[in-house]
Amino acid sequence: MTQAPKFRVWAPKAKSVSIAIGAHLRSAEAEPGGWYSTELLPDGADYFVRLDGRDRPDPRSRFQPAGVHGPSRFVVDRFAWQDQAFRAPPLSAAVLYELHVGTFTPEGTLAAAAHKLPHLVELGVTHVELMPLASFPGRRGWGYDGVALWATQPAYGTPEDVKRFVASCHAHGLAVLLDVVYNHLGPDGNYLAEFGPYFSARYKTPWGAALNLDEAGSDEVRQFFVDNARMWIEEYHFDGLRLDAVHELYDASARHLLQELSEAVHALEPVLGKPLCVIAESDQNDPRLTRAVEAGGYGLDAQWSDDFHHALHAALSGEQSGYYADFGRLEHIARALTDGFVYAGHYSTSRRRRHGRPLGDASGHRLLGYLQNHDQVGNRARGERIGHLVSEGRARIGAALVLTSAFVPLLFQGEEWGASAPFLYFTDHQNAELAEAVRCGRHDEFAQFGWDPKQIPDPQAEATFRRSQLDWSELERAPFKQRLAFYRALIALRKRTPDLLDGRRDRVQVSFDEAARWLRVQRGAATVLANLGERRLELPRPAGELAISFPERTQASPAPERTPFLLEPESCYIFVAGALKAADA
């Protein structure tokens, strides 16, 4: 006889557990291992888990409609999926698009974001990467201070709205990835410690206590996060996950949590009949993350490459403060394009020690390359995008180098048209003491960059959030319209040029002149020429036809290779040879 499903909660610290549904109190029966169970709750019931007389939200709650301190809502999944035939394209053919639901549209909801999917399809992206959806305090935030990790942020919509958004993406041919935060929880509404030994007594993170991944009681803590990863993929049909700051996952176990997560996600592929991916953010420049488990790695599919971003940003902007002190030369861009990591055992001035190790022969598809992302824009004092800091020509050079690289390109929302809106750091903490601590922390953090604290907008002000929302009317006006056309052309060229999709770093040839500030990148039949300087230059003309340029040039018949080619200041030119020419660019 099949046993009826139960409602269960892990609470080994509690002496008694019951479920409070309004005025009704239902006792829970103790089970081995610190678990308590009772019969399933009614669909739509609002409830608390009562721990020794204290009412707390359920750690595995699917929805917190009244916020992270309010009652949990029991949600039965009845969504009618129609996406069984959808298969995400491989990362080798991917162009990712990072999206923050609250600022992507004026409405700031998943329903409103779904109306913009045709724009992403026309742009040519393949994967939408949503910044965290887990519930956090208040209505405004980036999502990295989430505390109800199984519940969707109510300001964005209901759990069914999340499923409807994913289904709409799949109907448009777009895969969807979710950014999840497993390295820490936010400080407000975090009740996990009252349930069990979720936090470490040994390790600390920049945001507070680290998760207990290798001490007493850690088996169920680890399972909490593995089950969470599976939930987003099984219940919500996400095509993969992005793991935030995995270098803050402290785990001395023989089998690291990252390996366990990767194996758990990839084990769903034959069950669900579709490919899945797990991507990490890490500042360690460690190839072990994406190395196969059989070769001593963790088996993740890819990791973000901050080195490539920093090399581009410093060379384009001239910034040398903070971690940008390690970058700024064309040599660093060249090393990133060919070696993957700029610092692969090299001495880092900002860290005052050696950093990283070589990527080896790993494909470029193991790294994500980007000119902008939420961190590198939003963690500036005034949230400036690259277009706010450099000329149009330099911004386009950066885009061209990203979208012709051997890496998996990632764009940040609005980048494709050079959006005027900044992306600022914003919060909506209800605790006044915490809000003030966040303000002071931002001031201290920016001191290393020499930024004036007076320039930092108040993260708690709603105006700070509103300023960060995209203005979609810009798409029909100059110069935004022209920037968008440039990005569309770059993505289309990448997709139809096999030499730009192969991921072979050993086939990337880079030459440059540090003094004259020109750079040449060749990948098979495709060649990029860029002039980052302020003087007009002459270089030998690459083979093939001019496919894309800035400033724009009329496409002429191919001239003999080595014929002098004039490079305007702060310009970029992409040539494609042979049958791969971009005749319809």
Image (cartoon, rainbow, N blue to C red):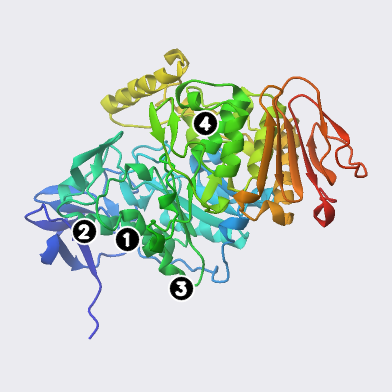
Under circle 1, the secondary element is helix
> Badge 1: few (under 14), some or many (20 or more) residues near its Cα, within 10 Å?
some
Q: Earlier in the sequence, mark 4 or mark 2?
A: 2
Above or below, 124 against 310 in this view is below
Q: Name the kind of residue labelled 3 in the image.
A: Pro
Q: Nearer the viewer, residue 332 or 303?
A: 332
**Residue ID for mark 3:** 270
Residue at 23 percent across and 65 percent down: it is 7
Badge 4 amino acid: Val
Location of residue 21 with respect to 272 vertically, above or below: above
**Residue 46 in sight here:** no
Distance from the alpha carbon under mark 1 to that under mark 4: 32 Å
Instruction: Residue under label 1, please give it.
Output: 227
Quadrant for the N terminus, please.
bottom left
Tally of numbered discs: 4
| Foreground tag (1 vs 3) | 3
Question: Which mark is nearer the camera, 2 or 1?
Answer: 2
**Earlier residue among tags 3 and 4:** 3
Q: CA distance from mark 4 to mark 2?
A: 37 Å
Q: Secondary structure at mark 2?
A: helix
Circle 4 sits in a helix, a strand or a loop, which is it?
Answer: helix
Horizontal relation, residue 156 to residue 41: left or right: right
Tag 3 near tag 4, CB within 8 Å = no
User: To which quarter of the image does residue 136 belong?
Assistant: top left
Q: Is residue 459 above or below residue 454?
A: below
